[in-house]
């Protein structure tokens, strides 16, 4: 299968690790510690051997609770599939494992002591994401340390989380609120176009990423905090914010071994996670608190539709009123969730348009026609949402390059969950949906590796907002991404303006490379560089 070459094979680390586990113990010489260690190792090996499919975390028949057993690889004793998945492109590795074992419905595996299942086809994905018993998320040490357990994404399903979602849906993500910040999006876009033009004139090509990252940060800072940064006059503040965001991304996205082997945390912390988190938290507190304090004293625009999200949070009363630390967590999370996703989705879209000039031209024609029929100098958000080809291009990018290929944040079962195929996922299991595997499966999509927006222009349109699990890059169910409309409004505007203002061509000295790197999200390994030619 052509796709199997794309997805990496499960590495055979166990071959290297086993001799190290079993070998070279001279029982005559070892100390008491040695005996204890040996006993522990033997116990782990025995547990692993008895556990069968799924590995050690699936011991005691956890994967045989239903009429049908949940299949899966054993991995190696103690570690399970940790070595295989702790590096590289986990979505491709998991897809290759699921395809080669024909375990696409669901596959069990162990990440150290964590039992995990992954769904790689739409039906089981739907059952997991829509189940009320999968409405919690497992929380990583870094997320806990960075206060995210009190923010929307990691708060356990319950009254507090429901209140946060309601507040955010009404005051930040509702269509009228997104519309209220349209002028800000236009401004960020105009600044980006100006900066790109200057860079092209000075350097002979442009590197898009840094411009998108600045626009994304300003977009979120504008609608959440009511603040935008000028890269020249506020360079120092902007540098501090950017460095905090970057550090947070790195800590949240890093694979932390002791999340899955808790005992390891006592003597091994390869990236100094604890120390770096406790260094970062006071910086976050100082910044966010200073913005909250500024809002407390300012009286203008408060509690009106034109206010920002900080104004809204400050105006809450009664049961809805949030403690200051909870406000800081909620506000800070928006920066994290809202900046990288929109920037990197736009970068992937533009990379595909550079590689597919005829699609780029067709898209430009659609946008130029829409502008000439509009009363304004550029198309409005409301019009952009109605441009079929533009939306098809963005959807096709979401299909080929889902920013969260494993839907970023996993789910946790709070009860035994019976699936329609007769399998039972036990309480306390981490569940992932491999959206990348679904969107690259030739049984689901014809010619899945081809960038072909036409597939969305006919009758076979697909709802990407969680209604159709063949393409659900924003997740689905009660924990579906609340920022999906804001994300799509931002990305379609940027793509429309970037294509309308410039022709995007390959830089022959550095051709487009679609290689990926998986961090908190999946981004281009080599930032897009292109030559742009102004259209007017
Ligand atoms: C292209 C843009 C985006 C993509 C692809 C994306 C993707 C996702 C995905 C896959 C999830 C997990 C959903 C699930 O478990 O079913 C999620 C959750 C979330 N997203 Fe987004 N997102 C995007 C933009 C945004 C923006 C702009 C914001 C906010 C400003 C945001 C805020 C959140 C939050 C708060 C959650 C957690 C929801 C919860 O657990 O209740 N996202 N997103």
Image (tube, rainbow, N blue to C red):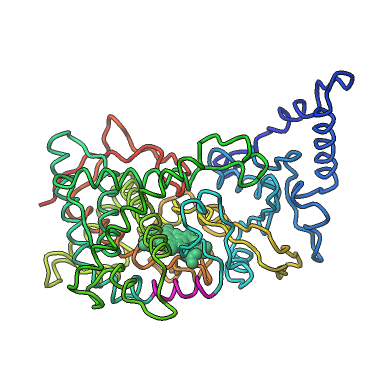
Height in image: 96 above or below 172?
Answer: above
* Figure quadrant of the N terminus: top right
**Residue displayed at 72% across by 30% down:** 17
Q: Position of residue 367 (x, y in %)?
A: 22, 62
**Residue displayed at 24% across by 45% down:** 504
* Magenta stretch bounds: 159-169
Q: Quadrant of ligand 1?
A: bottom left
Q: Position of residue 533 (x, y in %)?
A: 16, 44
**Residue displayed at 21% across by 43% down:** 236
Q: Position of residue 376 (x, y in %)?
A: 12, 69
Height in image: 397 above or below 123?
Answer: above
User: In terms of image quadrants, where is residue 9?
Assistant: top right
User: In terms of image quadrants, where is residue 123?
Assistant: bottom right
The foreground one among 491 and 534 is: 491
**Residue displayed at 41% across by 38% down:** 525
User: Position of 67 compared to 94: left or right?
Assistant: right
Q: Is residue 27 magenta?
A: no
Residue ranking furthest to the bottom: 318
Q: Position of residue 185 (x, y in %)?
A: 22, 62
The foreground one among 86 and 441 is: 86
Whether residue 471 appears in this view of the structure is no
Q: Is residue 166 magenta?
A: yes
Height in image: 225 above or below 420?
Answer: above
Height in image: 391 above or below 49?
Answer: below
Whether residue 414 appears in this view of the structure is yes
């Amino acid at each position: 299968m052509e796709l199997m070459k794309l997805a990496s094979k499960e590495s055979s680390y166990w071959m290297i690790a086993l001799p190290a586990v079993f070998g070279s113990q001279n029982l005559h010489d070892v100390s008491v510690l040695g005996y204890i260690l040996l006993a522990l190792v033997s116990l782990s090996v025995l547990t692993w051997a008895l556990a069968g499919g799924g590995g050690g975390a699936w011991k005691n028949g956890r994967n045989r609770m239903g009429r049908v057993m949940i299949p899966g690889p054993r991995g190696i004793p103690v570690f399970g599939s940790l070595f295989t998945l702790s590096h590289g492109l986990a979505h491709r590795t998991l897809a290759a494992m699921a395809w080669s074992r024909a375990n696409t419905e669901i596959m069990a595996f162990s990440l150290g002591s964590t039992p995990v299942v992954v769904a790689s086809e739409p039906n089981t994905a739907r059952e997991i994401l829509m189940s009320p018993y999968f409405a919690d998320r497992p929380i990583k040490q870094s997320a806990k340390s960075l206060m995210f357990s009190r923010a929307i994404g990691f708060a356990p399903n319950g009254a507090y989380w429901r209140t946060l979602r309601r507040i955010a849906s009404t005051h930040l993500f509702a269509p009228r609120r997104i519309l209220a910040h349209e002028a800000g999006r236009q401004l960020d876009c105009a600044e980006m176009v100006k900066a790109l033009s200057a860079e092209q004139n000075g350097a002979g090509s442009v590197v898009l990423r840094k411009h998108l990252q600045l626009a994304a940060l300003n977009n979120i800072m504008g609608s959440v905090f009511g603040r935008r940064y000028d890269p020249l006059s506020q360079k120092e503040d902007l540098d501090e914010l950017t460095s905090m965001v970057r550090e947070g991304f790195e800590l949240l996205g890093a694979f932390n071994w002791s999340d899955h082997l808790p005992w390891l945390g006592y003597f091994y912390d390869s990236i100094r996670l604890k120390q770096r988190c406790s260094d970062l938290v006071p910086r976050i507190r100082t910044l966010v608190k200073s913005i909250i304090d500024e809002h407390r004293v300012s009286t203008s625009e408060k509690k009106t539709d034109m206010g920002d999200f900080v104004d809204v949070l400050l105006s809450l009363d009664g049961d809805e009123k949030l403690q200051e630390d909870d406000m800081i967590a909620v506000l800070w999370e928006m920066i994290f969730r809202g900046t990288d996703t929109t920037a990197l989705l736009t970068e992937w879209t533009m990379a595909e348009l550079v590689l597919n000039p005829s699609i780029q031209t067709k898209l430009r024609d659609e946008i130029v026609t829409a502008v000439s029929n509009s009363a304004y100098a550029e198309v409005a958000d409301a019009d952009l949402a109605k441009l079929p080809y533009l939306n098809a291009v963005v959807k096709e990018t979401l299909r080929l390059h889902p920013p969260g290929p494993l839907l970023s944040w996993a789910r946790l079962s709070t009860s035994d969950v019976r699936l329609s195929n007769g399998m039972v996922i036990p309480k306390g299991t981490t569940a992932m949906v491999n959206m990348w595997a679904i969107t690259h499966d030739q049984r689901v999509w014809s010619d899945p590796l081809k960038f072909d927006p036409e597939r969305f222009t006919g009758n076979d349109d697909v709802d990407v907002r969680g209604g159709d699990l063949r393409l659900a890059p924003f997740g689905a169910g009660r924990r579906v991404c609340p920022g999906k409309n804001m994300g799509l409004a931002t990305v379609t505007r940027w793509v429309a303006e970037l294509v309308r203002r410039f022709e995007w061509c390959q830089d022959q000295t550095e051709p487009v490379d679609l290689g990926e790197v998986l961090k908190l999200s999946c981004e281009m390994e080599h930032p897009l560089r292109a030559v742009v030619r102004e259209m007017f």
